[in-house]
Amino acid sequence: MKRLCVCEICNCGRHRCTHQPTALYRKGSETCVVSEYVEKFPAYESCQPPKSLKPKYEYKSERSRMEGTTTFKSDFIPYEVSRRPGRQQADYQPNPGEIDLGTTYKQDFNSFQLQPVAPLRPKERVRVTSGKLNTVPTYKEDFRPWEISKRELAKPDVAYHPPSGKFGNTTTFQDDFVPRGMLPRETFKPPNIAKVSGAPFEGLTSNQLSYVPHPVEPRFVKAPEEYKPSDQPFLDLTTHRRDFQGLPGQMPKSCKPERVKMSSEAPFQSSTEFRESFQQWPVSLPQLHKSVEYVSPTADMDLSTTTRSTYVKHEVQPFISSKPFSRPTRSSAPFQANTTMKEDFKPWVSARRLDIIRMPEEIRRASGKMEDLTTFKAHFIQHPLQPNVSYKPLAAPMRADAPLEESTMYRTEFTPKKISVCPASFESPPGFLFEDIDERGHKVFRRVSEQDKIQVQAPNAVAVMS
């Protein structure tokens, strides 16, 4: 008879057996049936898993001695390399002539005399009173210092006395460590000796063998175009100068009310609540704390340290650097500051531009102050505002005489189904008998057979007959 556990009896997927943390001693060769893969994918005896082609991870030791030669050492052939010849620099020859440093700004700029702007902010006036303020704050009036006696120190008065003996500058490591001589290790590294070949070096490349020189065409140089100034005079008349008429106007009226100075002939009352209710209290002067005079020590300070007393000077030879000295390469020829920019872009010889020809002013400038009256202020006519008529329909609820259909798709298409109870939700599933618990924690049950039903019904029958 097939035995089932709670994991196999459950038909809702929510009930599982409680697994034990470890299973050291197994009772049988049964596999765990918790996963869904075992339930839906049974094993077939005809199909066996393929064998892995991955080699086994086993260490194979070789008794032979390891060779120190590599492919680089065996195939490398040293050649004699000669130094490449250096490039000789050509002597610099400065360009004759002077550079024209004049700009269009210097030619066309006209300087004007400017007057300083007068500040509109009035000068600050500081009012200084000749009287002296003699007042006492509330803190000094209400606060009274308490008479607190000085607290005696509980620390014992112990003077430090330096030891008279010499300090031993040895540590536990120096006392316990016994130095032993260094034993030279046997090196297995092969000697780094280059194998010189007697054959000459073949310096031919594919570029040298297959390169075919072709004639180069001369570079096309475009001739510079000559500058031709315009014969017509420059028109500097703008639309503002042409259309501005300078009509007289009225000054705008200010909407700000006039500032009226409020003055009173009654004398000023300078009495305050503090002056009327102030009561003078006698106050004692604060006591000054006298500092203790410093007395310098008479004995000399011992400036000797442990390093000075225990230091042993050794004669060490100075370090000699193996790096060769770098000799700067200097040339006797003068420095050439000529560049391709200076050679190809030379200053053009151009004549000085003429001054701007200005047309005579056709409109006379106004001498008076400009009026702030605009065309909008002068021609604006205020009209009464008419409200817009709204054509939006009223938000009235839509009502109908027909009754409301309360039927929905859920009510019409819903089919009730029978609710089944999972047998694994009971402590003892109906139709099964408990047998035991395996080493993994699975509760194993078996189905109730006919013999079990007869054994259960027999005692009940005997009890009825009695």
Image (cartoon, rainbow, N blue to C red):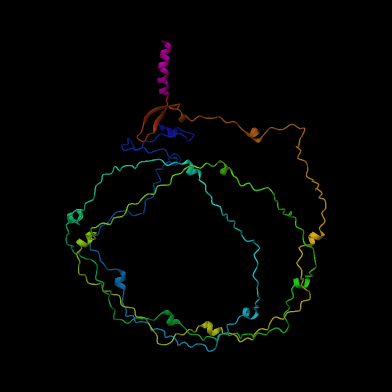
Judge whether 214 appears above or below 438 on screen: below
Place residue 313 in its image quadrant.
bottom left
- Left or right: where does residue 420 sit relative to residue 114? left
Query: Quick check: is 81 in the magenta stretch?
Result: no
Does residue 163 appear in this view?
A: yes
Residue at horizontal 33 percent and vertical 36 percent from the top: 28
Q: How many numbered discs sit on the rendered protein?
A: 0
Place residue 102 in its image quadrant.
bottom right
Closer to us: 41 or 66: 66
Residue at horizontal 31 percent and vertical 74 percent from the top: 76
- Quadrant where the C terminus sits is top left
Judge whether 392 appears above or below 199 on screen: above
Residue at horizontal 36 percent and vertical 29 percent from the top: 436
Query: Quick check: is 456 in the magenta stretch?
Result: yes
- Left or right: where does residue 282 sit relative to residue 349? left
Closer to us: 458 or 87: 87
Residue 374: percent from left, percent from top: 78, 62
Does residue 63 appear in this view?
A: no
Closer to us: 18 or 370: 370
Residue 334: percent from left, percent from top: 43, 87
Q: Magenta segment, which residues?
A: 450-466
Closer to us: 281 or 335: 281
Residue 408: percent from left, percent from top: 66, 34
Q: Kindly report the secondary structure that dominates the magenta region of the rendered protein.
A: helix
Which residue extends farthest top?
A: 466
- Left or right: where does residue 15 sit relative to residue 372? left
Residue 4: percent from left, percent from top: 41, 32
- Quadrant where the N terminus sits is top left
Place residue 111 in its image quadrant.
bottom right
